[in-house]
Image: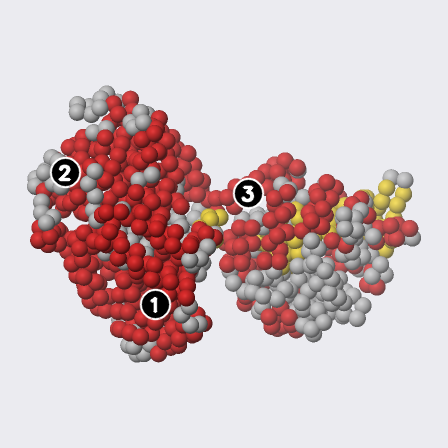
Amino acid sequence: MGFEIDRRPLWLLLIIRGLRPLFFVGIAVVFWYILTMPLPEGLSEEGRSAIAIFAVCLILWVSNAIPLAITSLFAIVLVPLLGVISRDETYGLFGNEAVFFILGAFILAGAVMHSGLSSRIALAMMDRFGASPKRLILSIFLLSAMLSCFMSEHAVAAMLFPIVLDIAKSLKLSPGRSGYGKLLFLSLAWGCVIGGIATFLGGARVPLAVGILQETTGKTIGFFSYSLAVFPMVVIMLFVGYVVLTRSFKIDVDSVEEAHSVFRGRIHAMGKLVYKEYAVGVVLLLTVIAWATLGGRFGLASIAFTSVVVLFVLRLVRWKDIEEYVNWGIILLYGGAIILGTALEQSGAALWMAEMTIANWASSPWTVIALFAFFTMLFTEGISNAAVIAILLPVGIGLAGRFDIDPVIITYAIAVPAGLAFLLPLSTPANAIAISSNYLTVKDMVKVGIIMSTTGYIVFNLVARFYWPLIGMGY
Amino acid sequence: MRRNYLSNPTTLKIDLMLNGIRTGGGLYEESSEQSGRAGLGVDLVLPKGTLVNVPSGDDFTKNSPYILKEDKKGHYITDGEGTVRVEVVPRPAFYNEKTSTGVLFSEIATVHGSYAVITPSPNCEFFDKSVECKYCAGNFDVDGTDKRLFTVDEILETAEAILKDGTSRIIYLSIGFSKGDDGGVELLAPYIEAVKKHFNCLVAVESLPPKENKWIDEAYALGADSVLYNLEIFDSELFEVLCPGRAELIGRARYLEALKYAAKIFPGGTVASHLIVGLEPPGSTTQGIDALTDMGVVPILPIYRPQSGKALRIEPLTAEIIIPIYKHLYKAVKEKNITTKWVREISTVTTPIEGRLLTGEYKKGVLSIIDGFYSSKLGMKAAWGLSALRRKLRVKEVEGKSSKSPKKTSKD
């Protein structure tokens, strides 16, 4: 934990601090107002309570006034307290398979990172393929994307960050000024973002969305089916990303030979490939194959936990090592989001809200998808991906029936764009990590990020409109 | 023909610090121990509550026109032509007490009026390396002996004794030059945190400037309410001659840069720097006052006390020559609206606020009520509370601020 000295005028700081209690009083007033307002037509009492809880969580998730996970706990407490869902069912929902899949994926990713295998692969690939400045950018970009297919994108960004920072330093790039410095960190961030939407593993948002879908409709999305649906989008975005990258900033270095000495130095320091790395790699590979082929039969979480057990049986990791990599807050966040989503759906509140909002603006299934994708991408630039899903998905699922859209399609329309965050450092941890290098400014990120976000939105809609029907996902 | 300074406490303080005082017999023996280990001197309270530590017993004091005497009514000073009543400040009772580890409190701390200096590390890396400050006889071990660091508990016990004694309400943690880029902040960190944790008092840090500004932020965030980076000599050439270690390892430019930065981080009037009067021409000291006050730094002007074998003082040096410097100091802090409530009631220096007695601006009434409030227990509690509130508002904890490898974030 570090600190900053806030040098703004003291009177301003006093006002800002003073606003916090007022802010919470305001939330309480909103909550009370919704709870006591006359019941609108078509909304049940439980639905009104669910909307009151939803409003409070929405404000807290968007404002980040308290940690996201704590907002989720708030939802977990209020849902049974106001009688929206029974207490047993509420806590039962917390045990959703998606939550446990996320936990299993964190542990597996932690094992891979702890073993050093991921760093070794990254270094070897960059050393092997990054011969010229452009090829090194491409290597970092593709490598980040590839690794983000197998582990959380922010874990990949965090893992590769020191390596990329060493590259920038070895090339004596000037922070904030060097075009190549900007490219290095943008390629890291964008690679993670694009790779992160490719599979269930890139971030916990897809499992969360599937969890909400499962609890509210009983339907699900398979590991392989998801990747198949987003595959063209990932390929197109990688291509566009590379083109935008190499044309947006000037490459101001002639050679990257010094970077290779960094790679070799680090590889040398790691020593030879050891049993633990081999074994963890094999377990991960088998896990991914099992997810793709047996996921539907045995469940993704069961496969993940089987692999986790194997890791411990083979003594490839210790619990102490894993604890460092598991973000327990995310587990709480997702559990709470699933409970809130289910509460909104079961009480009819989601449908009622959808009827009052998007249903009035949309005229066809296609516009519903386009609208949800738009709002998702807009929200995800400012608030947590998971919070966006928790906010929009229940509403989307509620609206699906009205337009005769399969809720699975709505889930894609929200879960996929939720990962397409290119604009701001607060949009996703990968962006924040890239900005923290000081080689890249927020202005740089926004300048080129807007191209990527616009392209991402267009590509998503084109893929949804023309490709999905080809694989049986018509609407 | 000497002027009569007895009627004005500030001029008398300056002249006493310049010439010292002669004492009679037992009184000298008794009072020479008052100041603990911070050199010889008698702590006196002059009229209008003006505190002064008067050199006594040094060679240069033998020709002082001032004599401290005692009659039935108490103590008084005479210069042969007139007299003025004074009080002799008794030696703090805790000086004779020891820490639980057996160290005399007087070895760790020295009371200088409203503040007490605690020296956790009685060593300075400059000593014995031919780069020590030529005038130095401060709180440190001038023999260069490697004394151990006092423990946090020893410092806490000392701080408790000081605060119980009640004379001093500000704890100055003072160290000499330490290796590293942090200006001693890392070394002082546990002491600052511990004192802040256990006592509601103000803490000042007197050290050498760190090489990077982030350490100044760190000192503030840790709990330091005030910071002193003592430039000592403003003239650049004399600075190199008299402070070779500071010039070589820190540099005058860094001193000024660090002071300027600190003045933006710490509350107004809490960043100070010593300029020693008598080691450089008065014009140079005056320039230093202007430069420091322009940055929002409070200049503190101790008068050089000549030591045998160290004839560094500019000559002639008389009260007539240096009083204008203190007048200028008062005018400069006033013109630039620099608060002086932090640097007050100090026996070893003439504070900027005492300079108003030189300009005839001292008036009883609202001003003295405000002064009284700042000096009162309630005033000190208010200062502590405001200082703590300011820190709470200013210091923001941020996750993963450094550019080291970030691991987990709460956003996904």
Left or right: where does residue B47 sit relative to residue A183?
right
Image quadrant where residue B329 sits: bottom right
For badge 1, the amino acid type reads Ile
Residue A361 to residue B29: above or below: above
Q: CA distance from mark 1 to mark 2?
A: 43 Å
Front-lying residue, B363 or B76:
B76
Which residue type carries mark 2? Answer: Ala
Q: Chain of mark 3?
A: B
**Which structural element holds mark 1?**
helix
Rendered view: B258 above or below A355: below
Residue A413 lies left or right of residue B314; in this view the side is left
Q: Nearer the viewer, residue A459 or A463?
A: A463
B236 w.r.t. B298: above or below:
below
Q: Are marks 1 and 3 on the same chain?
A: no
Say which residue label 3 marks: B388
- Please tell me which of labels 1 and 2 falls first in the chain: 1
- In the image, which disc is placed on residue A400? 2
Q: Position of residue A467 (x, y in %)?
A: 10, 54
Badge 1: chain ID: A
Instruction: Using residue A221 as the reference point, say whether residue B366 is left or right of it.
Output: right
- Alpha-carbon distance for marks 1 and 3? 50 Å
